[in-house]
Image: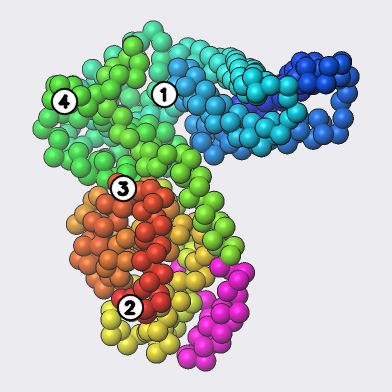
Amino acid sequence: MNKKLQALKYILFDFIAAAIAWALFFRFRKMYLEPSKFGYEVPLNIDDAFIYGLLFIPTCWVLLYAATGFYKTPYRKSRLKELSQTLTVSILGCTLLFFVFILDDEINTYKDYYLSYLYILFFHFVITYLFRFLITSRTVYRIQNREIGFNTIMIGSNEKAVALFLEMKGEKKSFGNKFIGFARVNKKEEYLLKDHLPFLGNTSELKKIVQENDIEEAIIAIESSEHKGLENIIGELEGLNVIVKVIPDMYDILSGSVKMSSIFGAPLITINREIMPAWQQTVKRGIDIAASLFVLTVFSPLYLIVSILVKSSSKGPVIFSQERIGIHGKPFMIHKFRSMYTDAEKLGPALSSENDPRITPFGKFMRKTRLDEIPQFYNVLIGDMALVGPRPERQFFIDKIVKKAAHYNHLLKVRPGITSWGQVKYGYAENVDQMIERLKYDIIYIENMSLTVDIKILIYTVLIVMKGSGK
């Protein structure tokens, strides 16, 4: 499957649909609205304004659809959901279009305004959805006939896993699961599923299995005796870009946890991975980029002063760079103004403490005012980090944390941040236990993630910087 090519199909036909709709509206203007106003026929001339509009307006439509996340999962489309999404965004876009481009038109009566709005909305929605329906229907047909599929791993190895695998394999129409193999929970001499799928490894090796086999879905089908390992399994999958589904028990069904997503197929609980609505994610990223550009340019004289003070306070480079773990477990290099002496970790990785002798005198001031974090705006600009998000850690400490708190991997679902609720409430952690204590604040943040919460955290961070009260 070529996801980029599939997304490009939607983008291309959305652009064409918007261009056709705008051309039809232009024709409607010239053949009905303007003659009604002026009392004579108006020639249908193709001028520069029309050409520019035919390029600019469809581009804006594509950007609007991208902002709402429509192109993120081009192979996982529901025609019914697509209908409601297309209608909702069409209403929003046409409303903006009306107030920006149509409201200043010369009209005969106010009824012409209503006609204009309904005309552009009708044609834009119908043409856009028609193209999308055709592309999605073709994709659904290919998925159902097993021409394309999503690499899937079965987690479980005995009766439930075998029964589910045979049920899904026996369905006349596939739901896109292309089983690569299975992972087991408890070690046994024989695994029932081994007769049907290759054994890929233990659940403790899920990250490696997912990365090596390009897994997109994981279906958990474990026995009742293996349920104690469920938390660790979810924890292993948490930071990975994988859709996780679980076999429901009767309690889940009666309590309403199982939501019907298809008339046919095995009933499965899909663990929701969508933390923020797509439009909020787009706005959040836009704010990150804008704020980073502002800080990196406007406050550049401050960086020169800080650089001179860092250099004069101790020997060594001005900028300290270190590998940290980011979203979906991907490593990146974080950049900070150096606040420690150059040989600070000659004995191995170690966390800093309040009276840490490794911190330079000026480094203590920078840590209290968060000045050492300023170069991380570059990390935000290039997409490694966000303004607000859990603080990124080194793999060395992540391994120690996960032994005591497997749910740490929950943090890897989002970009790490320059500041976080855990950082505001707790400050720098001095040991693994404090990192675990701070963890609960970051998990609560992720579960309640929104633009409003981000703004509150940023305000508190600014107050800490101004007061110099950081820990």
Q: Residue at x 41, y 15 (%)?
A: 174
Q: How is the image coloured?
A: rainbow
The majority secondary structure of the magenta stretch comes to helix
Mark 2–mark 4 Cα distance, whole angstroms, equals 47 Å
Mark 4–mark 3 Cα distance, whole angstroms, equals 23 Å
**Mark sitting on residue 255:** 4
- Residue corresponding to mark 1: 178
In the rendered image of this protein, does residue 415 appear above or below residue 308?
Answer: above
Q: Residue at x 55, y 62 (%)?
A: 292
Mark 3–mark 1 Cα distance, whole angstroms, equals 34 Å
Q: Nearer the viewer, residue 378 or 466?
A: 466
> The residue tagged with tag 4: helix, strand or loop?
loop
Q: Residue at x 49, y 31 (%)?
A: 73
Mark 2 vs mark 4: give the one in front: 2
- Three-letter code, disc 4: Ser
- Residue corresponding to mark 3: 448
Give the mark nearest the N terminus, 2 or 1: 1
Give the mark nearest the N terminus, 3 or 1: 1
Residue 331 seen in the figure: no
Task: Tell whether 113 sits left or right of 153.
Answer: right
Residue 290 locus on image (x, y percent): 57, 57
- Three-letter code, disc 3: Asn
Q: Nearer the viewer, residue 425 or 47?
A: 47
Mark 4 vs mark 1: give the one in front: 4
Give the mark nearest the N terminus, 4 or 3: 4
| Label 2: few (<14), some (14–19) or many (≥20) C-alpha neighbours in 10 Å | few
Q: Quadrant of residue 272?
A: top left
Mark 2–mark 1 Cα distance, whole angstroms, equals 54 Å
Mark 3–mark 2 Cα distance, whole angstroms, equals 26 Å
> The residue tagged with tag 2: helix, strand or loop?
loop
Q: Nearer the viewer, residue 403 or 409?
A: 409
